[in-house]
Amino acid sequence: MDLGLTPDEMALQARAREFSLNVARPRAAAIDREEQYPWDIVKALTEAGFCGMTIPKALGGQGRSFLDAVLVIEEMAKCCTVTARIVVETNMGAISTVMAYGSEAQKQLAARLVLAGDKPAICITEPDAGSDTTAMATRADRRGDVYVINGKKHWITGAGVSKLHLIFARVFDERGQELGTGGFLAVRDERKGLRVTRREQTMGLRGMPEGELTFENLEVPADMAVLPPSGFRRGFADLMNAYNSQRVGAGTVAMGIAAGALELALDWVKTREQFGRKIGEFQGLQWMLADMQTQATAARLMLHAAARSRGGDGSAFPDPMLAAQAKIFASESAIRIVNDALQLFGARGYSRDLPLERMARDVRMFTIGGGTAQVLRTLVASKMLGWKLPQTRDGYLPKPSMRDAAE
Ligand code: FAD
């Protein structure tokens, strides 16, 4: 299919496909079974230049686009979801936040770590603040030239393996006055007070640790606060904008898993015989295949459009509306496609000998992490209607700073 890609984009895609087939695919089952973060894959990705591709050339990166990242992510996800997620998180999300809003020193720090293979952790979710980020309780108190962070996050991707952390917290000045919500950069093990206190037991994506982080008097130098031009008071919304790139990346992982499952299913229906015929000769299965392909193509086109877009003048991030719609559609259709692909394999699809069951577990996450499909629908509806849609029962957001951030 002609996706309107340039020769350079097609060459990058082909290089990613080769890596995926030769390096990631042979490791995928063991990564899942052993539940170990694949440092060998990280090394190979780094050497191949797939980590930090979107970092500007001036900082040692390749200055590649989000679309370039999307092309690589899809190819990786066809064979190994954990590999694909490493590519997402070394090119989108926290790293793009720092590149968009960070000081020169912050950019240098983030670029150095990511280009060496570090997958930054983005720390927002808390036990009592999931979809409702305004309920965040983690706080950063200014004490002289540091911020002292206390609180707890959970479901943090890369807990215990990531070095760079972008920690979101409510910010208070020396007098205890709340200033808003900010992002703070901390490097694990360089400072006391950042501990992994639990590893989540996940359904899929088992080679990528998800964990609980506890901050106990974690001191972060004041110049490690990532401050958008709008400052702390309105800066949370700007910082959260970075999630629009992460959402496109996450949607692409889901679509890539689906595309990989579909490729396997297509080969299978041309091989497997029942009733003296290839099972692909049954019209019921042909229509299933056509629906799977249609959904995968639509998801791919939406993700490409979102990756190419920008959310307004000068924005470094994809358009929120396109990113949200692409993630909703890609994540939900990917679950259906993988489920149907597994069905086409019959009992074999249910076996751990084949990757379908792993794909079915892995793909389930993408309607949850990075903004659930329900919450993203509210975002889309809010933009369509041109209304703010506060979700509290009486439409009231208790803290003024949080009200600003949610606008
Ligand atoms: P809740 O907010 O409690 O939602 C429960 C259900 O209610 C959901 O179905 C939700 O859609 C629905 N719901 C809630 N509010 C509304 C509403 N207003 N309208 C309609 N429906 C609603 N977080 C990070 O900060 N960093 C990470 O690196 C990270 N990685 C993750 C990796 C994985 C594998 C997973 C599963 C999660 C990760 N998360 C991470 C957390 C993720 O962002 C949250 O799980 C997500 O925002 C939802 O929060 P919750 O789980 O508390 O669900």
Image (spheres, rainbow, N blue to C red):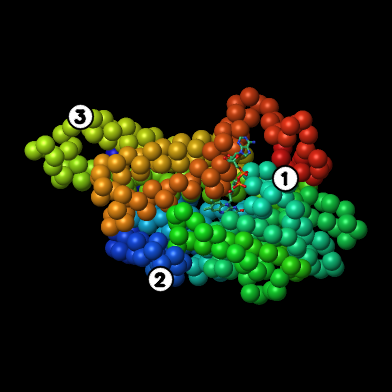
SS type, badge 2: helix
Confirm whether residue 133 shows in the render.
Answer: yes
Q: Residue 343 location in percent, x, y?
A: 29, 41
Q: Amino acid at mark 3?
A: Gln
Question: Which quadrant of the structure image shows residue 3?
Answer: top left
The relative height of residue 206 versus residue 187 in the rendered view (above or below) is above
SS type, badge 1: helix
Would residue 100 be found to the left or right of residue 233 on screen? left
Instruction: Look at the numbered discs 2 and 1 and tell me whether their residues touch, using CB distance below 8 Å.
Output: no
Between marks 3 and 1 in the image, the one whose residue lies nearer the viewer: 3
Residue at the extreme right: 175
Distance between the alpha carbons at the discs numbered 3 and 1: 51 Å
Q: Residue 185 location in percent, x, y?
A: 67, 63
Q: Which residue is mark 3?
A: 283
Q: Which residue is mark 1?
A: 134
Question: Which quadrant of the structure image shows residue 96?
Answer: bottom right
The relative height of residue 198 versus residue 240 in the rendered view (above or below) is below
Q: Is mark 3 within 8 Å of ligand 1?
A: no
Within 10 Å of disc 2 (Cα), the crowding (few <14, some 14-19, many 20+) is few
| Circle number at residue 384 | none
Residue at the extreme left: 276
| Circle number at residue 40 | 2
Q: Nearer the viewer, residue 30 or 90?
A: 30
SS type, badge 3: helix
Within 10 Å of disc 3 (Cα), the crowding (few <14, some 14-19, many 20+) is few
Between marks 2 and 1 in the image, the one whose residue lies nearer the viewer: 1
Q: Amino acid at mark 1?
A: Thr
Question: Which quadrant of the structure image shows residue 315?
Answer: top right
Within 10 Å of disc 1 (Cα), the crowding (few <14, some 14-19, many 20+) is some
